[in-house]
Structure formats: structure tokens, C-alpha cells
Amino acid sequence: MLRKIGPLSLLLAISLLFPVLARAQFVGCKNILQVTEVECEVLEKFFFETEGLSWFNNQGWGRTNQPCNWFGVTCADTEWPRPVTKIALISNNVGGSLPPDLSLLTNLKELVIENRDAVSQFNKLGGDIPAVLSNLPELEVLQLSRNNLRGVIPEQLSKLSNLRILHLDDNDLSGFIPKGLGTLSALEELDLSNNDFSGSIPPELGNLETLQHLNLGANALEDAIPPELGNLKNLVSINLQNNSLSGAIPGTLNNFPNLIWLSFSDNNLDGPLSLDIATSLAGINTCFLTNNAPGLCVPDTPSFRALGADPICGIPLSTTCSSPFLVEITSFDAALDGDAVLLRWTTDRGSPEIRFDVEQKVKDSFSVIGTVDGAGVADQEQSYTFRVENPGRSPFTFRLRQIDPSGIFAYSAEVTVQAVPEGFVVEPAFPNPFRRETMLRFAVATEQAVEAALYNAVGQRVRTLYAGTPTANVTQSIRIDTAGLSGGLYFVRLTGTDGFTATEKLVVVK
């Protein structure tokens, strides 16, 4: 006896069969031309796991035997089978998540799944970023902007040595920004804005010598702006706005010859701008520093007025920004004293109105470990000491922050001291290899004459890098630039009159 099927039951049965029927429409990877069967299977899995049946445009996908002609797919034409080199689906209603199998497209150069702008939010790619994307050795462009991606940025992405563009903005990503991104030596654009990243900006980003555009705006980043960002000499734009960054704008951010756009607004930045910083910012076409801490100010002095820019980045010149109480620190040193460190500094005059915050560097940031009140009279030098008990693990780096009653402050130079148990310590040069300059540090246990010289690969002396008598246990820094050097292998030889010798290998990349 036949049972009558109602319209609703029939519709439900068809909907359940629809994915099966849709897959049945595929011509099958064994019948595919142009690409390998493996790459075809990856594309097929990508299609279904990103809800390809709902894409606005899925022309050709699985319905023809020529994947290189499927919408959004590009293949190389220099070999057969033709490897897939690009997948680009912009504002195409892409959903689901990225299958890890994409890592099998080993010739992929570009993966672009993003929405064109904030209005056309059609793509809604979710899930985590697969860590195995790091197995795409040819990948140059990874643009996944304006989706619903969550989780963290996999540290493994730092293996993508050819990556030029990394856009992960406008998602739901969180956690810390991986320090390993600082090893992406070919990176030109980094956009992580409008996510929920927290913690500090990694100083390692300062190693990205080719970076032109840096956007970390609208996150939950905190602590100080790392001075290492001053190494990014090719920057055209930098956006750190709408975070919780604090402290002063580093004095190293004063030499960006190509910079035309900068925004540090809506943070907790503080302190008066130095003349070098103000001079640099006054020459930028578009610049924003508004909505920071009240102490962020520009002194109204003849030197600042001579810049011909008022306001500077939205901050007007202020007569209250120049503090009459801050002093010049004429000397600042540190010395080991048993298990403690003794800090000593001298100022050009007394100033009882100020205080000194003593800060010690731990990992990548400074924190206050003590306070010393200002003292003395205005027409006499004043000396101070501060003893740091149990300073932790050597080496020890300190700085001073002097603060006046209105909150205006200024930092001293940093001083580093370390225990030298075996006569001397030489820290490996960093970065190495390097294109423009590197830094090598050393310290000796006893005061002695030291010379450091640079030699080429055949043993010819190229130049003297250092000659002097350093204070015992105090770290000395040698800056080595590539001016006049050709690419290749070099050696730095250090010798001391107490008999120590050390050799460090350098690689110059040109």
C-alpha cells in the first residue's frame, strides 16, 4: 500500500539529500585536467568546508574539469600539471573554516579571503588559523581581513620567509602578538588592527627592515612603545591608535624619511615631546596624538615654535609643558657591590621639587623598583645613590625617570652592569645576519685596555671598532654598520691586556 507523502516531508527529504546531490555534480578529481589529483582534492575539500554552495560566485567549481578556470583560482602556466598559486575570494559569502589540507598546495603564493570594506561584510570565515599554513614555503600574501576568525596567531607562521603581506585585521583574534613575526624579513605590510590582542608590542618587530605599513590599532595592547620600532626606516604609515599604550614616545622614533601617516591617538601616552620627535612629527602629512594622558604635551619654547607647526599632531604648544624643575643628569653609573648593585648619579643642580623613579628592565619592559626624592640647592651639583638588593639574574639594566610636581617627566640613559665570572663576557651580535647595522656587547671582570677590530674573510683588518678601558662589569656596546662593506663573512676580534681574546662571526647581507 502506497503512503502519501506530504509537501513538508518531501521538502525535508530533498534538503537532507542536497549536499549529496551537490557533491554528485562534481566531475570527480580522477577526471580533472590541469592540476594534480591531490590539489584537486584539496580544492574540493576547501569548497565544501567553506560553504561553497552558498558563495555568491562559485562558477566552475567541480562542474568543469579545468580547476585553473574555476572562479578565484589561479595556476602557474610554466609547468604541467599546473600548480595552484592563488586563491582569491573577496566579499563572496565565504563561510565555514579553512581546512588544514590547504598546506598541501605547496606552490600557493597568495591566499586572499577577505571583505572588500567594512560595509560589504559578506565573507564570514570562522575557526582558527591553521598552524600548518606555515608549510606553504612560497606564500607571499595572506589576507584574511574582515572575517570571524578566532583564537591566536600561530607562532609557526614565522616560518613563512617569503611573506610580504599579512593582513589579519577585523577578526576576533586574541592573545599576544607572536615575537616570531619579527623574523619575517620580507614583510612589507602587517595589519593586525581591530582584534583583541593584548600584552606588549614585541620589540622584535623592529627587525622588519622592509616593513612599509604597520597597523596595530584598536586592540588591547599595553606598556610602552618599544624603541626598536625606530629601526623601521622604510615605514610609510604606522597606526597604534586606540590601545592602552603608556609612557613616553621613544626618542628613537625620529627618523622615518618616507613616513606620511601616523596615529598614536586614544592611548595613555605621557610626557613632553622631545625636540627631535616634534621635528620629525611636524614634517608628517597626516598625524594624530590626541586623546592621550594629560601629560603628553609640546613645550612652547623658541626651538619648538621655530618648527612652524602649532598644533603638532593635534597637540598645541603649551607654556606649562616646559618644567623649570627637571635637571640634567650629568653622570649615571652602576657597580656590583657584593650581591647588590649600587647606582650613582649626579645632576647639574639640586631640585628638591622632583623625585626620581628607579626602574629596572625585566625581559622587555621597565618597572619601578624604588624612589629617591630630589635634594640640594639650585646653584650646586647634587649627587645621589640607590642600592638595589637582590637584583635578580645578570645582566642588570636600569634607568631613571625624574618627575616634577605637575607630572612632566624625563628619562635618563640606560646603564647596564653584569657579573662577569670568567674574566669577560661577549654577547653574540644581534641582528646577525644584518643589512644596515648590528650591535655587539661585551663586559670585562677587571678594568683593562680592550680593543675590538673587524676583519674580512681572508684575515685583512678592515677597521677598529673599539679601543678603550671599560669599567669592570659594565656592559659596553659596539655598533657596527655596513658602510663601506660588501656582503659576506666578517670576524670581530676582541683582545684585552689581561690576556682575554674572543672572536665573533658576522654575516653582512647586501
Image (cartoon, rainbow, N blue to C red):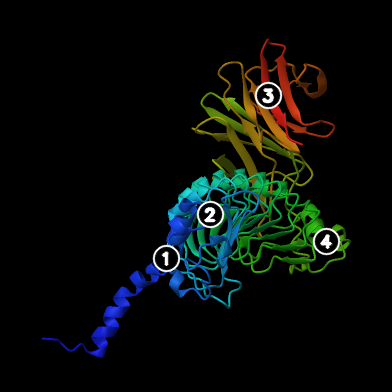
- The first of marks 2 and 1 along the sequence is 2
For the question of whether residue 193 can be seen, the reply is no
Q: Looking at the image, which is closer to me, 262 or 144?
A: 144
Q: Looking at the image, which is closer to me, 138 or 442?
A: 138
Q: Nearer the viewer, mark 4 or mark 3?
A: 3
Label 4, label 3: how far apart the Cα atoms are: 40 Å
Label 3, label 1: how far apart the Cα atoms are: 52 Å
Crowd band around label 4 with a 10 angstrom C-alpha radius: few (<14), some (14–19), many (20+): some
Q: Residue at x 48, y 60 (%)?
A: 173
Q: Residue at x 64, y 41 (%)?
A: 399
Percent position of residue 419, x then y: 57, 24
Which residue in the protein does label 2 denote? 35
Which residue in the protein does label 1 denote? 48
| Residue 217 position by quadrant | bottom right
Query: Is 414 rendered above or below residue 451?
Result: below
Q: Looking at the image, which is closer to me, 44 or 408?
A: 44
Residue type beneath disc 2: Val
Q: Is residue 188 left or right of residue 196?
A: right
Secondary element under disc 1, as helix, strand or loop, is helix
Label 2, label 4: how far apart the Cα atoms are: 52 Å
Which residue in the protein does label 4 denote? 283
- The first of marks 4 and 3 along the sequence is 4
| Residue 379 position by quadrant | top right
Percent position of residue 71, x then y: 56, 68
